[in-house]
């Protein structure tokens, strides 16, 4: 009976001791963590935003009805200012122009011939009139001394009067004929100008250099629709950039444009203009500022299209050979209203087997100065190269706490 009690007490003692030891071991077991190594490399901070491609687009159409004779361009063709893009049928206009020009030349020749005949006839009448007046004066002087008959004087006067009437009639008739011919010449010239304008209107001309974006015309069909021409050098990207990123932006800064339609071929650009007013899409949301970008990449004219969706990215800060840590290793604390940044630094146990897949170490919290940061990493002062820091540190960490972690790639043996 006594031996049975001894065995029972021993069993209870083992159970209690094991429980105590298990709790102790669990309390002092290393905390599993993930670590990263500080490294030096180029750092850059980027701002980006999405938007659409804009450009100055000319919509060109015929001002007169007709049937298409020729279409000289296709979509994506590049043209120079003054290039003929399409033509209407022009036979009737050409015939009208030739007829009007011929009529104007013929009428002009008639006017010149009539002027020449009028001048000749008027010259003869003026000469005859001058002779008749001289003869009349002589007859009048002779009559005064009784050497000439009165009837001779009266006959001379009738001749002078008749020649004056004939000259006036000739000039009036010639003037009327001249005015009529001039009116006909003016009408012929007006018809010629209308035909010339009609021929011009029958040709669709590029007002500027650019790229053809749309062609609605087909040869032999009615001239309905238009040709759209994107002016060269006017392609712009208008993107919305978060307000926190705009303080580092300035006109002329280089940018990278990725088209949703062709993301594998980014295009180079520069900031052309910063907007003057930010907008907020929803209540409580952050504001964005419209920023315009101008392409500097020659291939943009062939790849980009007005209306395409694009993402603009600008490097707003660059630091060469910067000591960096993952952003998730950074701890932000406030003390007496002052913001401080700290990291958990791991010191591997020197007794750890260098070939072990997991390494034991201890931790300490260290204050660092953040020089710059982006979405993935932070540039810091206060650490040295190859220092091990904890990423996403658990809340249970404390100074000198034992931790366990998997060996970091290229980690040096302790």
Image: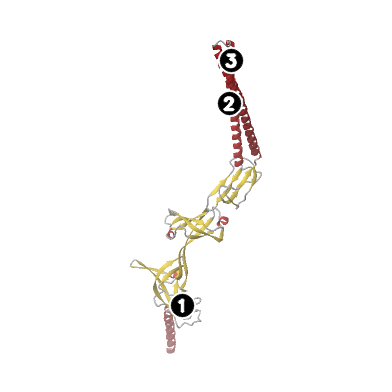
Q: Which residue is mark 1?
A: 404
Residue 331: image quadrant is bottom left
Mark 1 / mark 2, whichever is N-terminal:
2
Q: Residue furthest left?
A: 336
Mark 2 / mark 3, whichever is N-terminal:
3
Judge from the rendering whether residue 239 lies leftward or rightward of residue 167; answer left or right. left
Q: Relative to 192, is 215 above or below?
A: below
Residue 89: image quadrant is top right
Label 2, label 3: how far apart the Cα atoms are: 29 Å
Which secondary structure, mark 3? helix
Residue 371: image quadrant is bottom left
Question: Disc 3 vs disc 1: Cβ atoms closer than 8 Å?
Answer: no
Residue at 44 percent across and 68 percent down: it is 378
**Can I make out residue 134 in this image?**
yes
Q: Position of residue 252 (x, y in %)?
A: 47, 58
Q: Which residue is mark 3?
A: 156
Q: Position of residue 201 (x, y in %)?
A: 60, 41
Q: Which residue is mark 2?
A: 175
Q: Relative to 174, is 221 above or below?
A: below
Q: Position of residue 385 (x, y in %)?
A: 45, 75
Which of discs 1 and 2 lies nearer the camera? The answer is 2
Which secondary structure, mark 1? strand
Residue at 60 percent across and 45 percent down: it is 204
- Quadrant, the N terminus: bottom left
Mark 3 / mark 1, whichever is N-terminal:
3
Q: 314 or 206, which is in the foreground?
A: 206
How many marks can you see?
Answer: 3
Which secondary structure, mark 2? helix
Which of discs 2 and 3 lies nearer the camera? The answer is 3
């Amino acid at each position: 009976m006594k031996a049975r009690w001894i065995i029972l007490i021993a069993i209870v003692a083992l159970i209690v001791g094991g429980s105590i030891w298990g709790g102790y071991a669990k309390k002092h077991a290393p905390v599993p963590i993930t670590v990263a190594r500080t490294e030096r490399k180029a750092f850059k901070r980027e701002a980006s935003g999405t938007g659409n491609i804009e450009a100055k687009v000319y919509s060109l159409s015929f001002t007169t009805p007709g049937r298409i004779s020729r279409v000289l361009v296709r979509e994506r063709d590049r043209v120079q200012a003054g290039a003929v893009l399409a033509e209407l049928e022009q036979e009737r206009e050409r015939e009208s122009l030739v007829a009007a020009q011929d009529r104007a030349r013929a009428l002009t020749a008639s006017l010149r011939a009539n002027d020449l005949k009028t001048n000749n006839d008027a010259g003869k009448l003026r000469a005859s009139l001058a002779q008749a007046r001289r003869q009349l004066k002589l007859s009048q002087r002779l009559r005064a001394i009784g050497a000439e008959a009165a009837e001779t004087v009266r006959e001379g006067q009738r001749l002078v009067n008749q020649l004056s009437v004939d000259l006036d009639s000739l000039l009036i008739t010639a003037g009327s004929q001249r005015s009529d011919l001039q009116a006909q010449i003016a009408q012929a010239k007006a018809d010629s100008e209308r035909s010339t304008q009609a021929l011009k209107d029958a040709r669709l001309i590029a007002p500027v250099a650019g790229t053809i974006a749309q062609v609605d015309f087909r040869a032999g069909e009615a001239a309905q629709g238009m040709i759209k021409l994107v002016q060269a050098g006017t392609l712009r990207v208008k993107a919305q950039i978060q307000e926190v990123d705009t303080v580092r932006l300035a006109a002329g800064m280089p940018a990278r444009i990725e088209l949703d339609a062709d993301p594998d071929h980014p295009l180079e650009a520069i900031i052309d203009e910063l907007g003057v007013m930010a907008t907020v899409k929803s209540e409580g949301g952050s504001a964005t500022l419209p920023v315009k970008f101008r392409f500097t990449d020659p291939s943009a004219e062939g790849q980009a299209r007005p209306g395409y969706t694009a993402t603009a990215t600008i490097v707003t800060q660059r630091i060469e050979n910067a000591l960096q840590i993952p952003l998730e290793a950074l701890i932000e604390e406030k003390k007496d209203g002052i913001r401080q940044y700290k990291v958990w630094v791991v010191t591997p146990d020197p007794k750890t087997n260098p070939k072990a897949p997991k390494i034991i170490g201890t931790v300490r919290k260290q204050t660092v100065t953040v020089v710059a940061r982006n979405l993935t990493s932070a540039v810091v002062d206060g650490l040295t190269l190859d220092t091990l820091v904890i990423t996403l540190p658990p809340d249970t960490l404390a100074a000198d706490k034992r931790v366990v972690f998997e060996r970091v790639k290229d980690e040096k043996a302790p």
